[in-house]
Image (tube, helix red, strand yellow):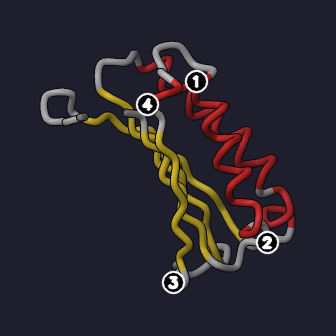
Amino acid sequence: MPHLKLDATSNVLELGEMPEILRELVAELCRHETIDPASVKAYFHEQRVWTMGEGARPGFVHLEVAVLDGRPLELKQAIAQGMRGVLERCFARSIAEGLVGFTIEVRDMDRATYVKA
C-alpha cells in the first residue's frame, strides 16, 4: 500500500542508478513502524520536458511518499527526514553541481477509498 513515486529531470547525473536508489528508498521506508515491506511499491518517472521558475536550480528531484491515513504526524515527519537522508546521499553529485533541488511530500491516502486486491 505505501507508494514511493520518484520524479527527476533528465539532467540528473544519477539516472543510471535509479534501480538502486529505489531499493534504498524502499529500505528506508521499511525501517519505520507500521510499514509492511510486502506492500511497498516504488517507481521512477524521468521528466524529459520541464521548466523551472526564475532563480531555481535547472532541474529537480521530487519524492512522493503515499501512505494510508491514520499514522501519527511524528511518524510521517520521521519518514520524511529518513527519505531526505537517502536523497541527499543518492543525488549528492547532482546536488553538489547545482543541477537539482529536491522536495519530499508525505501524503495520506484515504483508507475509505483505497482499494487493494
CA neighbours of label 4 inside 10 A, class few (<14), some (14 to 19), many (20+): few
Indicate the position of residue 38 as horizontal and vertical percent values: 49, 28
Badge 2 or badge 3: first in the primary sequence: 2
Disc 3 is placed on an element classified as loop
Badge 4 or badge 1: first in the primary sequence: 4
Which residue bears the numbered disc 1? 78
Badge 4 or badge 3: first in the primary sequence: 4
Numbered tag placed on residue 13 in the rendering: 2
Q: Quadrant of the C terminus?
A: top left
Three-letter amino acid code at disc 1? Ala
Is 43 situated above or below 70? below
Q: Nearer the viewer, mark 4 or mark 1?
A: 4
Indicate the position of residue 60 as horizontal and vertical percent values: 61, 67
Query: At x 73% / y 51%, what residue is drawn?
Result: 20
CA neighbours of label 3 inside 10 A, class few (<14), some (14 to 19), many (20+): few
Disc 2 is placed on an element classified as loop
Is 80 situated above or below 78? below
Three-letter amino acid code at disc 3? Thr
Query: At x 37% / y 18%, what residue is drawn?
Result: 71
Q: CA distance from mark 3 to mark 1?
A: 31 Å
Numbered tag placed on residue 51 in the rendering: 3
Which residue bears the numbered disc 4? 39
Badge 3 or badge 1: first in the primary sequence: 3
Q: Quadrant of the N terminus?
A: top left
Contact flag, marks 2 and 4 (Cβ < 8 Å): no
Q: CA distance from mark 1 to mark 2?
A: 27 Å
Q: CA distance from mark 2 to mark 3?
A: 18 Å
